[in-house]
Image (tube, rainbow, N blue to C red):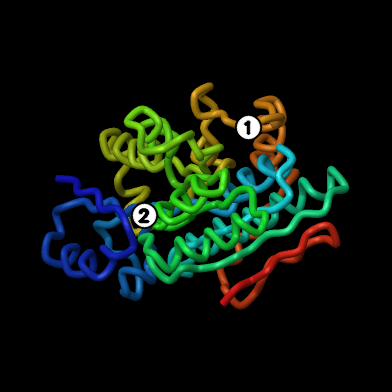
Amino acid sequence: DVIVCVGYLYGASLAWAADQYPNVKFIAVDVTQGDIGTDTIPANCYCITFKEEQAGYLAGYAIAKDGKTKLGFLGGMAVPAVIRYGYGFVQGADAAAQELGQNIEINYFYGGQFYGDANITSRMEGWYSNGTQVVFACGGGIYTSAVEAALKNNGYVIGVDVDQNYIGANGVADGTYAYNPFITSAMKGLSEAVNTALSDIEAGDWSEIAASNGNFGLEDGDYIGLPTADDSWNFETFTKDEYETVKDKIKNGEITVDNNSDDATKPTVSEFTTVNYIQ
């Protein structure tokens, strides 16, 4: 039997379940040994994590190359995955700013929760009304506050984890949204990584991945990226060829994205980039 669990909140439950059901194979997505709280990953568990910093980098690079100079990052809780998304976003935007010789400004804030509310919406309205063009909304349902504020101020958002363009498209179709505010999404291959693990199990290779942590990035395959379907590609000038070029540079190691997830240690940026870290 195989059980797939998604999200770090399953960590403590996995420690118990893995002990109680030693013959069950657990695939734990976005879960680390630290989340489980054991000295080692249980023998019947396989943890899957991602190099979110690479996805954040691609989104930041793309949006800055697309000509946007006033950016925002709205994180949920300052957990490692969210921090890596945000710091990658800053690094990518800064790299594009250097290439263009263009000054950019990034507002950076953690909402402390994974859902939108009136207070966060009000903050986002302040950002947009003061010139922010695009906000990378990173943290579960917190995107609702960014979208609500964007639509009131002709602003835009970047989705996270999966291609969230469908939210904007559905909103336009049912009349909820005046336009689709999603330009792109910073994605990680959740289903792809799980399918890889299931294929390993089917092939009899469970022993090779059990009690370990597979950390998936572009070096391992297309586990990180932006959506390239025409309906989801809502950039004005940034091209798919430019995207493939920067993605390949990460894949082959020409570009290395810092994977720091310490909230106290901010990414280094050039003189072209100003980051306003808001408490």
Q: Nearer the viewer, residue 248 or 97?
A: 97
**Three-letter code, disc 1:** Phe
> What numbered label is drawn on residue 84?
none
Q: Which of 35 and 274 is in front in this view?
A: 274
Q: Is 63 situated above or below 10? A: above
Q: Name the residue under label 2.
A: 141
> Which residue does the image show at 14% across and 45% down from the upper left?
1
Specify the quadrant that holds the C terminus.
bottom right
Q: Is mark 2 on a helix, strand or loop?
A: loop
- Residue 75, given in percent of the width and then of the height, sits at 50, 62
- Residue 54, given in percent of the width and then of the height, sits at 59, 48
Q: Residue furthest top?
A: 230
Q: In this view, does 18 lie to the left or right of 54?
A: left
Q: In this view, does 190 lie to the left or right of 16?
A: right
Q: How crowded is mark 1: few (under 14 residues within 10 Å), some or many (20 or more)?
A: some
**Three-letter code, disc 2:** Gly
Q: How crowded is mark 2: few (under 14 residues within 10 Å), some or many (20 or more)?
A: some
Alpha-carbon span between mark 2 and mark 1: 23 Å
- Residue 146, given in percent of the width and then of the height, sits at 48, 53
Tell me which corner region of the image, top left, top right, bottom left or bottom right, holds residue 217.
top right
Tell me which corner region of the image, top left, top right, bottom left or bottom right, holds residue 65.
top right
Q: In this view, does 173 lie to the left or right of 267?
A: left
Which is more N-terminal, label 1 or label 2? 2
Q: Which of 133 and 210 is in front in this view?
A: 133
> Which residue does the image show at 35% across and 69% down from the upper left?
35
- Residue 4, given in percent of the width and then of the height, sits at 24, 48
Q: Mark 1 points at which residue?
A: 235
Tell me which corner region of the image, top left, top right, bottom left or bottom right, holds residue 22.
bottom left
> Which residue does the image show at 73% across and 49% down from the upper left?
69
